Image (spheres, rainbow, N blue to C red):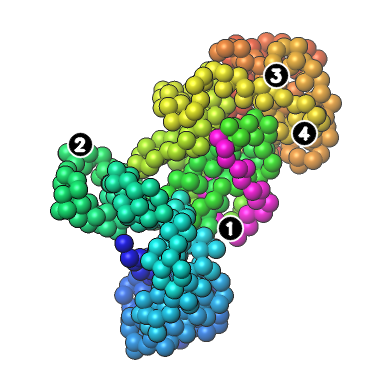
Amino acid sequence: MRKCILVLLILSMALTVAFAEKAGTESEPPALTLEEIYQAARDASDAKDYARAAMYYELAADRGHAKSQNNLAYLYKEGLGVEQSNEKAMKYYQLAADQGLSTAQYNLGLEYDFGYSCEQSFEQALKYYQLAAEQGNVKAMHNLGAMYKNGDGVEQDYAKAMEYFQKALDGGFEFARVNIGLMYENGYGVEQSLEKAVECYRKAKDYGGEAAEAADAELDRLAEEGKILAYVIPDAHTDALNRLYMLNRASIAKMSIGDGPVYVIGHRSPDSDTVCSAIAYARLLTMLGYPASAAITQPVNPESAFILKTAGVETPPVLEDAAGKSLFLVDHSEYAQAVEGTEDAHIVGILDHHGVGTVSTGYQLVYEAKPIGATATIVWLDYLNYGLEIDKPTATLLLGAILSDTANLTGSTVTEADREAVASLVGLTDITDVQAFFRELHAEALSYEGMSSEEILFSDYKEYEASGVRFGIGLISAIDEEHARVLAERMKEVLPEGFKKAHVDLLFADVGIREGSEKTDFIIPCEGQSREYLETVFPKYDEYDGTSYIFRNGGLGRKSKFVPGLTEYLNAHPHE
């Protein structure tokens, strides 16, 4: 299959009427920033006022705005709003590519590859595809694969072709699956397998879009050649299911991802649910064609490290400052829990199973919150709803996260969806004994060997805010009551120093024990206001031993009781 895929350049995303007015008149634009000029050009292009779009693009392009240079090149190439000029198209593509814009590098590669606006040069095409691919451009990866497959300007190398096709597919570019199918069909660099080829074509066909059209053509060809039976038209149920997948995918198509990439990231003091959900959801977004990568706020704890190792997945990099970046938040919606710089970041979406937090944005965003046991269960549901395949590593991550966050499905927030998720995910992994797996990860969660009291306090720590009062709760797991009391004493000693470092108004440590479905919490407040609020809001504790307020018979779960109760009280009694 010869590489194709022309660039889609003119995006549709309108701003408010107020900004449209700010854009000024056609003859005399006001003094706008480069981004505002660029947005004005996009708005004009959306309205098919290409002359006006070209004027704005050129204004920003001549001041060095790479995306404007790239889009202006397209207008010159197509003669939209300007006199058609291959020379100017190549000029502006080159300017944008020289600034490192991967889209422009890919477009320049296309021009040289096919000789659209210039003399054909495979050498130059290879150069610019490689530059774009190094920045994660999946279409460039795909076209590099095609060059090595066909021997265009390079020595034919099926192994490299397959490598690039697979990278493009792993990055979410479904069209690459059709070429992988052709590799299997013809035995190019792989063992010939018509079965695998047909499987690739049918998966691509089910995906939809250009990949489906190309795959359909290959299946029709094989049927005409008598190599397979004519492709069976799906029954009404399958048609309805595919339609549902497409509609679910379309529901997030207007997601405002900014300049990308989108960093999928959980809360500070990351637990297994936040780490594993971020990795799995980043993969989901990538499969849907969005440039996404997982990140964490701090190094992972021993339990998360165990799950990642079991899944064979690398630990995501730490993102220290999110200012100016595009974020998709998972497992939290509080600025107090978010990575540094979140208030100055572009929030693309939120996926959570807690209450509504303080994070806000003026943009439309993907917002999905459910009263459910784990964020990982929501991620699992989204894979189902979008019709996406869950591979073995992802299944292992999601399974570990759900078991961790629901305490092996015994927590008070567990739903039938959580139970079904575990039952489904197990079958996709190499794990044969779920209970043994949980015992291993739970043992890692209880392992505080070599950790200081302060590190234990902040190992699973979250901050919240209500009515101007900022409070933090550190969650610590204990094996039994004896162990819990030892940990409680350590927390009591370190809380004053932790209070200074956390910069909160109230600080608590919650040492929890779980035996089967029975939960007990030892709540240790920092002296002063923290103790007063605890006694006022939760007066029905079972015991006070001089260090801890002990809540038996279900405990005082941070997510289910502690945070909701304290938040409700603070909202009803605003801080003076």
Within-10-Å neighbours for mark 3: few <14, some 14–19, many 20+:
many
On the image, which quarter does residue 523 sit in? top right
Q: Are marks 1 and 2 in contact (CB under 8 Å)?
A: no
- Please tell me whether residue 324 belongs to the stretch shown in magenta: yes
Whole-angstrom CA distance, mark 2 to mark 3, is 50 Å
In front: mark 4 or mark 2? 2
What amino acid type should be assigned to the residue bearing mark 4?
A: Glu
**Residue holding disc 4:** 455
Q: Are marks 3 and 1 in contact (CB under 8 Å)?
A: no
Within-10-Å neighbours for mark 1: few <14, some 14–19, many 20+:
many
- Please tell me whether residue 482 belongs to the stretch shown in magenta: no
Whole-angstrom CA distance, mark 4 to mark 3, is 15 Å
* Residue 325 numbered mark, or none: 1
- For the N terminus, give its image quadrant: bottom left
Residue 397 image offset from top left, x and y in percent:
53, 34
| Residues shaded magenta | 311-331
Q: Earlier in the sequence, mark 1 or mark 2?
A: 2
In this view of the protein, which residue sits in the foreground, 132 or 21?
A: 132
**Residue holding disc 2:** 237
Residue 342 image offset from top left, x and y in percent:
61, 52
Whole-angstrom CA distance, mark 4 to mark 1, is 29 Å
In front: mark 1 or mark 2? 2
What amino acid type should be assigned to the residue bearing mark 2?
A: His
